Image (spheres, helix red, strand yellow):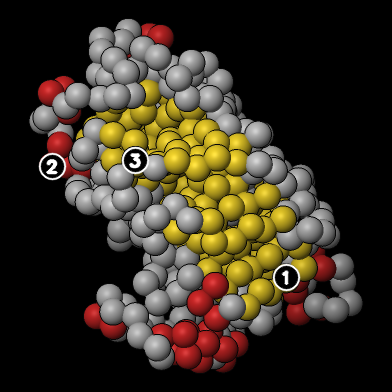
C-alpha cells in the first residue's frame, strides 16, 4: 500500500475551541469559502464522533463540520464550506487540532486523504494520501493513527514520521481505539483471525492477541489507561471485558438473545458502568465488577523510566480487583444457580438500566456526569438521560435537542 505524506511547518500550538467562537468569521481559511452562507435545509449529517473525554462531539456534514459541547449542550464552533463536506472528523480533546477526511462529494479533499488541520493558524499542518479510502483516524497528543480496511498506520505527531504498520483482517468499520494517559501507549484493533483483537503495548514493546469472540469483531473500546478492553461481535448478543496485559476475560454481559448490530460501547470514567447502543433502539447500561486502582493524576504529567513498570504492576493486579457482588449488580436468571448444567444463556448477566429510542437511526452513547448518559443520533438528535445507580431500570430522559435535521443514517 503506497502512501504520500506531506507537511508544511513542523510543530503546532494547541488552544481551546471556545477561544475562537466569536472570531471564526474573520479568519481566512484555505479550506475554501469557510463559513459561507449555507441553507440549513441542504445540510446532511455524514458522521458523528466523540472527542477523547466525551465532553464534545464533532459532526461531519456535506457542507463542512460542527463542534458541539455536551454539558451544557451547545454548538461551539462550525465551518460551513461550499466545496464539500467531511465524512470523518477526529478531535484532539478540546484543542484546535482536527483530523479531517473528505466526504464522497468533496471536490477538494477525497476520502482517501487525511488532513491534519490547525484551526488556530487556519492552515493544514500535514496530509496523508492513500490508494484506498480511509476508514478512521484516531489521535493522541503524540500519535496519529490512520485506519484503512486492511492496514493501520501509526505516525509520530510532531514530525509525521511513520512508526508502525499493522496488518488486520478486513476492517470496513475502521475499528481501532487508543489509550490516552501520558504514561501508557496502547492500541487495540482487529487481528488477522475472525473474532481476534490485537493489542499493542507500545511502551512495553509487547503485542497481545485476544480471541474475544467466535464471530467477527463489531465494536471495541478501552479505558483511558488502556488496561481494560470491551468488545462485541457481529452477533451482538454478548459484550466481554478483558485485561489487555494478559488477555484474561474478566466479565461477560448479555445485551439480548436476538442478533443486533452494535453501534457503540463506552466505559464510564470510574470503570463502574458500561453502555451499549445497537440497532434495536435501546441503550443498555451494565454494572462492571472490575475495579481499577487509579494512579495519582499528578504523576501522569511527567512520564519517567518507571512508568512502564508501574503500568505493568497495576494491570497485573486487575484479577484481584474483581468484586463478586457490588451495589447495583446486573440482574441474572432465576435459574442461574444451575450454572454449568443449563445452557450458558441462563447464567448471563443482563443490563442494569436501559433507555429506549426510535429504531430509525444509528446512535452512539457515552457517560456524562452524575449518573447521566449522553446519546447522539445520526438523525441529528441529542439526548441526556439519568439512571438510578442503586435500583437501575428504565432511564429518565432529562434533555432532548434536535441539533441538525438529517435524513442520512451514516457516511
Q: Residues within 10 Å of mark 2 (few under 14, many from 20)?
A: few
Please state the horizontal and vertical placement of residue 309, each as a whole percent of the image. Answer: 48, 90
Looking at marks 2 and 3 on the same chain, the residue that comes earlier in the sequence is marked by 3
Query: Are the residues flagged by discs 1 and 2 in contact, CB closer than 8 Å?
Result: no
Q: Secondary structure at mark 2?
A: helix
Compared with residue 407, is residue 202 higher up or lower down, i.e. above or below?
Answer: below
Disc 3 versus disc 1: nearer the observer: 3
Query: Are the residues flagged by discs 2 and 3 in contact, CB closer than 8 Å?
Result: no
Please state the horizontal and vertical placement of residue 262, each as a whole percent of the image. Answer: 64, 46
Tell me if 237 is positioned left or right of 82 in this view. right
Residue that label 3 marks: 8
Q: CA distance from mark 3 to mark 1?
A: 40 Å
Compared with residue 108, is residue 75 higher up or lower down, i.e. above or below?
Answer: below
Tell me if 42 is positioned left or right of 122 in this view. right
Tell me if 157 is positioned left or right of 353 in this view. left
Residue that label 1 marks: 210
Residue in the foreground of this view, choosing between 356 and 25: 25
Looking at the image, which residue is at 76% across and 46% down?
A: 170
Residue in the foreground of this view, choosing between 232 and 289: 232
**Which label belongs to residue 19?**
2
Query: Are the residues flagged by discs 3 and 1 in contact, CB closer than 8 Å?
Result: no
Looking at marks 3 and 1 on the same chain, the residue that comes earlier in the sequence is marked by 3
Q: CA distance from mark 2 to mark 3?
A: 24 Å
Please state the horizontal and vertical placement of residue 21, each as a whole percent of the image. Answer: 15, 34
Splitting the image into 4 quarters, where does residue 269 fall?
A: bottom left
Please state the horizontal and vertical placement of residue 205, each as a whole percent of the image. Answer: 59, 78
Q: Residues within 10 Å of mark 1 (few under 14, many from 20)?
A: many
Name the image quarter holding the C terminus: top right
Compared with residue 225, is residue 91 higher up or lower down, i.e. above or below?
Answer: above
Amino acid at each position: 500500500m503506497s502512501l504520500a505524506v506531506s507537511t508544511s511547518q513542523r510543530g503546532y500550538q494547541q488552544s481551546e475551541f471556545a477561544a475562537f467562537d466569536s472570531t471564526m468569521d474573520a479568519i481566512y481559511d484555505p479550506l475554501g469559502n469557510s463559513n459561507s452562507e449555507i441553507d440549513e435545509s441542504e445540510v446532511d449529517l455524514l458522521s458523528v464522533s466523540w472527542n477523547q473525554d466525551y465532553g464534545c462531539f464533532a459532526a461531519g456534514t456535506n457542507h463542512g463540520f460542527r463542534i458541539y459541547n455536551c454539558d451544557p449542550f451547545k454548538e461551539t464552533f462550525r465551518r460551513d464550506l461550499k466545496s464539500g463536506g467531511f465524512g470523518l472528523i477526529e478531535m484532539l480533546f478540546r484543542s484546535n487540532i482536527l483530523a479531517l477526511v473528505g466526504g464522497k462529494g468533496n471536490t477538494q479533499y477525497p476520502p482517501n486523504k487525511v488532513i491534519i488541520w490547525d484551526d488556530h493558524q487556519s492552515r493544514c499542518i500535514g496530509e496523508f494520501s492513500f490508494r484506498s479510502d480511509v476508514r478512521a483516524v484516531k489521535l493522541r497528543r503524540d500519535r496519529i493513527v490512520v485506519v484503512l480496511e486492511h492496514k493501520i498506520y501509526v505516525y509520530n505527531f510532531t514530525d509525521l514520521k511513520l512508526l508502525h504498520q499493522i496488518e488486520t483482517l478486513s476492517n470496513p468499520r475502521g475499528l481501532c481505539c487508543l489509550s490516552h494517559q501520558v504514561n501508557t501507549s496502547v492500541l487495540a484493533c482487529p487481528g488477522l483471525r475472525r473474532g481476534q483483537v490485537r493489542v499493542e503495548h507500545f511502551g512495553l514493546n509487547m503485542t497481545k492477541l485476544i480471541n474475544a469472540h467466535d464471530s467477527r469483531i463489531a465494536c471495541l473500546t478501552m479505558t483511558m489507561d488502556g488496561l481494560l478492553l470491551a468488545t462485541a461481535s457481529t452477533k451482538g448478543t454478548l459484550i466481554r471485558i478483558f485485561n489487555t496485559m494478559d488477555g484474561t476475560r474478566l466479565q461477560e454481559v448479555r445485551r439480548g438473545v436476538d442478533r443486533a448490530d452494535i453501534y457503540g460501547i463506552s466505559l464510564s470514567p470510574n470503570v463502574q458502568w458500561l453502555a451499549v447502543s445497537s440497532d434495536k433502539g435501546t441503550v443498555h447500561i451494565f454494572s462492571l465488577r472490575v475495579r481499577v486502582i487509579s494512579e495519582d493524576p499528578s504523576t501522569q504529567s511527567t512520564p519517567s523510566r518507571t512508568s512502564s513498570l508501574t503500568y505493568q504492576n497495576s494491570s497485573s493486579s486487575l484479577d484481584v480487583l474483581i468484586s463478586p457482588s457490588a451495589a447495583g449488580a446486573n440482574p441474572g436468571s432465576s435459574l442461574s444457580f444451575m450454572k454449568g448444567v443449563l445452557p450458558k444463556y441462563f447464567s448471563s448477566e443482563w443490563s442494569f438500566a436501559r433507555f429506549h429510542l426510535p429504531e430509525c437511526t444509528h446512535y452512539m452513547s457515552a457517560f456524562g456526569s452524575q449518573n447521566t448518559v449522553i446519546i447522539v443520533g445520526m438523525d441529528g438528535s441529542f439526548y441526556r438521560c439519568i439512571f438510578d445507580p442503586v435500583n437501575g431500570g428504565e432511564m429518565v430522559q432529562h434533555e432532548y435537542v434536535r441539533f441538525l435535521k438529517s435524513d442520512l443514517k451514516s457516511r
